[in-house]
Amino acid sequence: MKLSIYSLFILLMLTGNCFGLYQLITGKQEFMARFPKLNGNNYFVLQLLPAINIIALAGMWYFKTWSPWLAIAGALLVIAVDLYFQVWYHLWLAIPSTVILLFFIIKYWDQFK
């Protein structure tokens, strides 16, 4: 299969979200110490976001009808959570990634039907 820019982007996003989920599962104490607004109850939200994004990106790989909506929702939730918990170092990556994701969704919109 010839890898297009779209495929490469989806694979890169999948890799990043898998790594993020791994970090969130294994480094809870570090995150709790680094971000004071985090507590045991809302930490689960941080772990849930990459899992949702992994599902959305896998759906986008196969051009499933529901996947652009879930991907957009996941990306916007990540930005909102980054802003709320003041995760500034991740925000510089989340915003451009969301813009590129929106570009690909618009470009390939007809294939998601």
Image (cartoon, helix red, strand yellow):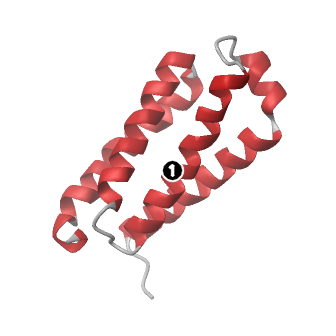
Q: Name the residue beneath numbered marker 1.
A: 52
From what the image shows, is residue 16 above or below residue 58?
above
Q: Residue at x 79, y 17 (%)?
A: 33
- Which SS class for mark 1? helix
Q: Is residue 48 left or right of residue 100?
A: right
From what the image shows, is residue 78 above or below residue 33?
below
Q: Residue at x 38, y 65 (%)?
A: 60
Q: Viewer-proximal residue, 61 or 3?
A: 61
Q: Residue at x 81, y 35 (%)?
A: 27
How many numbered circles does the render carry?
Answer: 1
- Identify the image quadrant of residue 63: bottom left
Give the residue at the far front of this rendering. 41
From what the image shows, is residue 81 above or below residue 14?
above
Q: Position of residue 82 (x, y in %)?
A: 51, 25
Give the residue at the far top of this rendering. 36
Q: Quadrant of the C terminus?
A: bottom left
Residue type for callout 1: Ile
Q: Is residue 94 left or right of residue 14?
A: left
Q: Position of residue 45 (x, y in %)?
A: 59, 33
